[in-house]
């Protein structure tokens, strides 16, 4: 049974300059025990998508009338966008869904110890005793690579280094064993050794509890080692999706190709890096037609700037929203 079904998710924000579209009618699914990587530059809409799954977007947020996000737990189905009361939202936040935020300090109250915050959520969501919650919390702090976990348990967030705060936040998010874990750049502040430990831990948790993970990052190398499937986002749209190894080996969309070309080549360290030309446009100035055409060196004149490309199946399970993919499919047919 599919764990999460997101259909036509549209997220708009009211600003002083006018209404902007941060996420533009995206759809995807997530199975239990699956890791979906969301990839794209800053401003692509990855974090807004993730926060929508917990209804955490601040400000004047409006969701599209046809948008839905169905989360399944056993026989229960929850449409996250239809939740109204704090009690209903609390069932999702920290219980069915946990989130590892990009900034560790966003997860911890500065005047409460790390351990107290971890035990309180376990006592609330998992009905554990205080001693049971402490034991599980210390164990998870150990498992994410925090030395002297019992000592750190009684410290405040500001007493820990940035990397240690990040690991403590990951431990706190995993402790309630949610059905869905959202990891927003979870390894950004960590050195490569701790990154490997954290990625291994997340894989263990997926295998042990069958939770689904949405893993948000700009690092395609991390995605290659972590995700089962990948969705590439650009300016609020999913422009390519498929099994992670298939997409990385055979990228169909020019933007995905650009992201991969920008990575250092270990087999040729003298090769220059090739960045994607230009900058991602402001959401207030969304291009017409294909949203990527203003930066695409292969844009088709008279077509990409006027028409929105359809989603085309490249191979089974691998799709690309690009006219070039459509043309290749026509040639192959």
Image (tube, grey):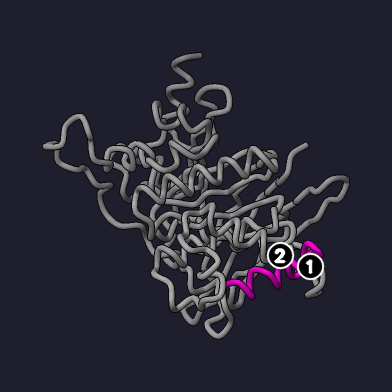
In this figure, what is the number of numbered marks? 2
Does the segment drawn in magenta span residue 129?
A: yes
Task: From the viewer's side, name the closer residue of 214 and 195.
Answer: 195
Q: What percent of the width, then of the height, locates residue 104?
A: 48, 68
Q: What percent of the width, then of the height, locates residue 210?
A: 69, 41
Q: Mark 1 to mark 2: distance in Å? A: 6 Å
Q: How crowded is the residue under tag 1: few (<14 C-alpha within 10 Å), some, or many (20+)?
A: few
The span picked out in magenta is 114-131
Circle 2 SS class: helix
Corner quadrant of residue 11: bottom right
Q: What percent of the width, then of the height, locates residue 201?
A: 54, 46
Q: Is residue 208 visible?
A: yes
Look at the image and tell me in which quarter the N terminus lies: top right
Circles 1 and 2, Cβ within 8 Å, touching? The answer is: yes
Q: How crowded is the residue under tag 2: few (<14 C-alpha within 10 Å), some, or many (20+)?
A: many
Q: Which residue is mark 2?
A: 133
Task: From the viewer's side, name the closer residue of 3 and 23.
Answer: 3
Circle number at residue 159 = none
Q: Which residue is mark 1?
A: 129
The residue that appears at 60% across and 49% down in the rendered structure is: 26
The residue that appears at 22% across and 34% down in the rendered structure is: 266
Per the picture, the main secondary structure of the magenta-coloured stretch is helix
The residue that appears at 32% across and 43% down in the rendered structure is: 296
Q: On the picture, is 8 further left or further right than 111?
A: right
Task: From the viewer's side, name the closer residue of 279 and 124.
Answer: 124
Circle 1 SS class: loop
Corner quadrant of residue 100: bottom right
- Please say if 255 is above or below 248: below
Task: From the viewer's side, name the closer residue of 149 and 82.
Answer: 149
Q: Is residue 49 visible?
A: no
- Please say if 148 is above or below 250: below
Q: What percent of the width, then of the height, locates residue 130?
A: 74, 70
């Amino acid at each position: 049974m599919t764990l999460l079904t997101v259909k036509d998710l549209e997220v708009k924000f009211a600003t002083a300059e006018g209404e902007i579209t941060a996420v533009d009618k995206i759809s995807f699914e997530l199975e239990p025990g699956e890791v979906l990587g969301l990839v794209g530059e800053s401003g692509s809409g990855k974090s807004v998508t993730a926060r929508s799954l917990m209804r955490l977007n601040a400000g004047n947020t409006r969701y599209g009338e046809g948008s839905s996000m169905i989360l399944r737990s056993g026989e229960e189905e929850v449409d996250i966008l239809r939740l109204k009361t704090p009690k209903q939202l609390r069932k999702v936040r920290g219980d069915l869904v946990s989130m590892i935020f990009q900034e560790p300090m966003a997860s911890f109250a500065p005047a409460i110890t790390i351990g107290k915050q971890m035990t309180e959520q376990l006592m609330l969501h998992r009905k554990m005793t205080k001693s049971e919650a402490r034991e599980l919390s210390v164990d998870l702090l150990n498992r994410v690579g925090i030395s002297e976990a019992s000592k750190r348990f009684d410290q405040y967030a500001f007493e820990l280094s940035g990397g240690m705060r990040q690991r403590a936040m990951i431990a706190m998010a995993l402790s309630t064993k949610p059905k869905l874990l959202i990891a927003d750049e979870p390894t950004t502040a960590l050195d490569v050794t701790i990154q490997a430990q954290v990625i291994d831990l997340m894989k263990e948790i997926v295998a042990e509890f069958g939770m689904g993970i949405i893993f948000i990052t700009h690092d395609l190398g991390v995605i290659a080692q972590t995700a089962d499937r990948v969705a590439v986002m650009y300016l609020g749209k999913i422009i390519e999706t498929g099994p992670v190894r298939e997409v990385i080996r055979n990228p169909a969309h020019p933007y995905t190709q650009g992201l991969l070309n920008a990575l250092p080549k270990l087999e040729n360290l003298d090769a220059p890096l090739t960045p994607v030309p230009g900058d991602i446009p402001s959401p207030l100035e969304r291009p017409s037609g294909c949203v990527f055409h203003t930066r695409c060196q292969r844009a088709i004149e008279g077509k990409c700037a006027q028409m929105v490309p359809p989603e085309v199946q490249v191979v089974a399970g691998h799709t690309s929203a690009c006219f070039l993919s459509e043309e290749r499919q026509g040639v192959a047919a």
